[in-house]
Structure formats: structure tokens, C-alpha cells
């Protein structure tokens, strides 16, 4: 009876950990969309709000890490629960670094908004949207233990990589034709690369989910 | 007696885990130095060898992760040992991603070696050296539990950041003066940014070491 009581409360704690990761994921999804909306709408106040959100995400990371250590120490989980908690320890680091990337994007946006617009943004919002979906699906795959969805996320990464290459080529053309655009083009290039890095983090999360579900490691094997 | 026997063998396993992390760290240090040597010496064969090393680092990551899970499950460590193992789980991810960065640098080097040299490299080797030292010191701090050394690593990161900004500015001048340099300058810029990312990974490791040693979290507090 006592044992069952402990298990039930452990399940509650694991479920609470899951909720915290999702809340943190929700926050960084807002940051991805917001940083690009700030770019497209030339909304510096929004960029500032995204930069400020980075602190909240950092605080989430620290508290999730502490909770994981506590559960490992007090509950001494085995098998599936152990794998779940170690996965949370790793996912939280990726989420925190996505937050950093969004803050960095927003800092470039703040600078770009002080100069005349270079061109209408078409591919960057598409890239940000695809990246946001990848992160959402990676976290859904984590919550549901859905390895098929996680495999889809890994495959979608090449779409974002291709968009990044396309954006870089287009910016190169701008810079060659008119050197006065170089400084702005480099900042947009930075934003494009940051989105690509965020997609890499989502892919890392998805790969780790597959590891958790399948119990074997497919990292570094999906092309 | 039996209990002592178990503890002694656990210590051996922890020490073996430490050795594996150091070996993996040594491998990525070789990759950092090698990828930049391949750039400076225009040595494409060396760049190819660095790219190939990335697979070895990936294999290290998978095997260290498995060992950590095994120790957590079978040994149910508490307090300091628990914190050590969870730290290893996180450090190994940073080391693997440094390996990725070095492979990416080497791919750009391979492309640059097919074009005429843009300029002699002075700041990039300095940056690579500083980054390599940061990584080495972060891992030394980890092994010795030396939080002072870890704090030094966090502070050194700004030197690498400054070098990156300086390199970017210099490349911008090249591009504005002669648009035919833009494609090469962008690749050198990519290499500079990759080194900066590697320094960020070393800083992340150092911050986590401080967490392990002090038992409290100073992440996101050092300027």
C-alpha cells in the first residue's frame, strides 16, 4: 500500500516534470515566432520583450535541472523513468540555447530596424515557421513517446537547411550588386543561420526522443 | 566488506568515466587545432581527416551516455556522484557538438583551399588557440573540481567574442572594397563564428563544473 502510494506520487512528479518542459518549450516557441515578427513588422519594442524573455527561460532551465537531480537522488528510478529523466536533463539544455538564439536574433533585429529595409522578407518567415513546427513536433514526440513523429522532425531539418542556403545565396547577390547592403545583409544572414541552429536543436531533441522510445541509439545515423 | 568492495569498484567506474570524457576532449582539441592548421597550411588532406574524426567523437558520445545510464540504474548514486554523472551526461553533448563544428569548419576549409588565398590568417589562429585553451581548462576544471579555473574559462570567453567581432569587421572592409572577395570572406566569417560557438560550448562546460563544485547554480549570472 505504502509502495503504491510512493509510485503514484512519483508518477505525479514525472508528469509535473513533463508539464514544466512543455511550458518551457511553449515559451521558446513564442520567442521564435516573436523575434521574426519583430523583424518583419520592424517592431523594436517586441524585439526588446523577446530579449527579456531569455531570463525566464534561463530560470526554467535551472529549476528543471534541480528537479531532475532531486528525483534521481530520492526516487532512484530505473529503466524507463531513468531514461526519461536523463532525457529531460538534455532537452532542457537545448531549449535554453534556443532561447539564447532568439535573444540574439532579436538583437540583430533591433539593429536592422534602425536602418532602411533591405527587402521584403519571404523566406525567413517560412524558415521560422518550419523551425517552430519542428520544435513543437519534437516536444510532442517527447510527451507522447512517438518515435515516428520524431523521425519526421529529423527529416524536416533538411528543408530548413535548404532554405538557409537559398537565403545565403540571395544575400550574396545583393552584396555583390550593391556593397552598401553588406552590413545589413550580414545581419540577415546571421538571423538565417540562427534559425538553422534552432532547427538543429529541435533535431537533437527528436533524436534523443527516438533513443528514449526505442532504447537504442539512432543518433548520428539518420542522413 | 562486501559494501566496501562495491564502493571501490564504483570509484573505479567513475574514474573510468572521467578518463573517457578526457579522451573525448583530447580528440576534439585535436580537431580544433587541426581544422585551423588545415586552413592556414591550405592542407585539404588534413581537413578530410578532421571531417572523418567526427564519427569517432559521435561514437564516444553514444558509449559515454550508455555508461552513465548503466551507472545510474545499477549504482543508484547519491549526492556528489549523482551530480558528477549528470554533469558527464551534459558535457558529452557539448563535446559532440564541438566535433560537429570542427567538421563544419573543415568543410569550409576544403572549399577555401580551391580558391586563391584572401589574406594571411593572423586573428583566426589566435582565436582557435584561445578556444582550445578554454576547452582544455574547462575539462581540467571538471577533472579537478576546480571552480576557480572554471570561472577563468567563463571570463576568457569575452576575449574570443571580441576577436570574432574584430574579424567580422575586417572581413566587411574586404567585401566593401572588393566584391569579388565576398564569397571567400563569408566562408572565413563562418569559420570565425564556429570558433566562437566552440568557445561558448567550453563556457557552458565551465559553468556546469561550477554548479557541480559549488552545489549551486551560477549559470546565467557571470557577465
Image (cartoon, coloured by chain):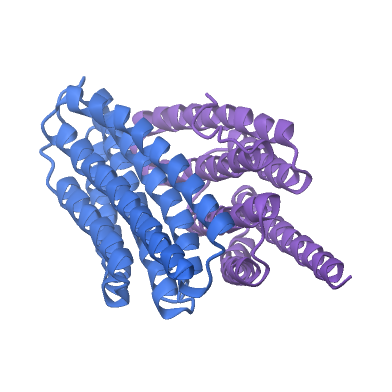
Chain colours: A blue, B purple
Decide: is A33 above or below B28: above
Q: Identify the residue at the far right of this view.
A: B1
A5 relative to B36 in the view: left or right: left
Report the residue at 78% width, 44% height from top: B144
Q: Identify the residue at the far top of this view.
A: A114
Decide: is A206 above or below A135: below
Q: Nearer the viewer, residue A76 or B28?
A: A76
Residue B142 placed where, x, y %?
71, 46
A155 relative to B104 in the view: left or right: left
Residue B151 placed where, x, y %?
66, 30
Total label count? 0
Report the residue at 57% width, 70% height from top: B62
Report the residue at 31% width, 27% height from top: A52
Please tell me in which quadrant of the rendered image residue B163 appears. Answer: top right
B1 relative to A215 in the view: left or right: right
Report the residue at 43% width, 41% height from top: B185
Would residue B58 be visible to someone looking at this image?
A: yes
Please tell me in which quadrant of the rendered image residue A100 appears. Answer: top left
Residue B108 placed where, x, y %?
48, 54
Decide: is B67 above or below A197: below
In which quadrant is the N terminus of chain B drawn? bottom right
Q: Identify the residue at the far front of this view.
A: A1
A94 relative to A47 in the view: left or right: right
Residue B127 placed where, x, y %?
61, 37
Q: Nearer the viewer, residue A128 or A164?
A: A128
Would residue A196 be visible to someone looking at this image?
A: no
Amino acid at each position: 500500500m505504502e509502495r503504491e502510494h510512493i509510485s503514484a506520487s512519483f508518477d505525479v512528479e514525472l508528469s509535473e516534470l513533463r508539464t514544466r518542459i512543455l511550458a518551457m518549450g511553449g515559451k521558446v516557441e513564442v520567442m521564435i515566432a516573436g523575434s521574426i515578427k519583430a523583424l518583419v513588422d520592424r517592431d523594436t519594442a517586441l524585439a526588446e520583450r523577446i530579449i527579456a524573455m531569455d531570463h525566464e527561460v534561463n530560470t526554467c532551465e535551472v529549476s528543471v535541472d534541480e528537479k531532475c537531480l532531486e528525483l534521481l537522488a530520492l526516487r532512484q528510478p530505473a529503466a524507463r523513468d531513468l531514461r526519461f529523466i536523463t532525457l529531460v536533463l538534455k532537452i532542457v539544455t537545448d531549449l535554453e540555447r534556443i532561447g539564447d538564439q532568439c535573444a540574439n536574433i532579436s538583437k540583430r533585429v533591433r539593429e536592422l530596424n534602425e536602418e532602411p529595409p533591405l527587402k521584403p522578407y519571404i523566406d525567413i518567415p517560412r524558415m521560422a515557421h518550419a523551425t517552430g513546427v519542428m520544435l513543437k513536433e519534437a516536444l510532442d514526440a517527447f510527451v507522447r513517446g512517438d518515435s515516428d513523429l520524431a523521425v519526421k522532425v529529423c527529416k524536416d531539418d533538411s528543408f530548413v537547411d535548404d532554405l538557409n542556403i537559398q537565403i545565403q545565396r540571395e544575400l550574396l547577390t545583393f552584396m555583390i550588386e550593391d556593397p552598401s547592403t553588406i552590413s545589413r545583409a550580414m545581419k540577415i544572414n546571421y538571423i538565417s543561420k540562427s534559425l538553422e541552429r534552432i532547427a538543429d536543436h529541435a533535431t537533437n531533441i527528436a533524436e534523443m526522443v527516438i533513443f528514449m522510445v526505442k532504447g537504442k541509439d539512432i543518433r548520428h545515423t539518420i542522413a
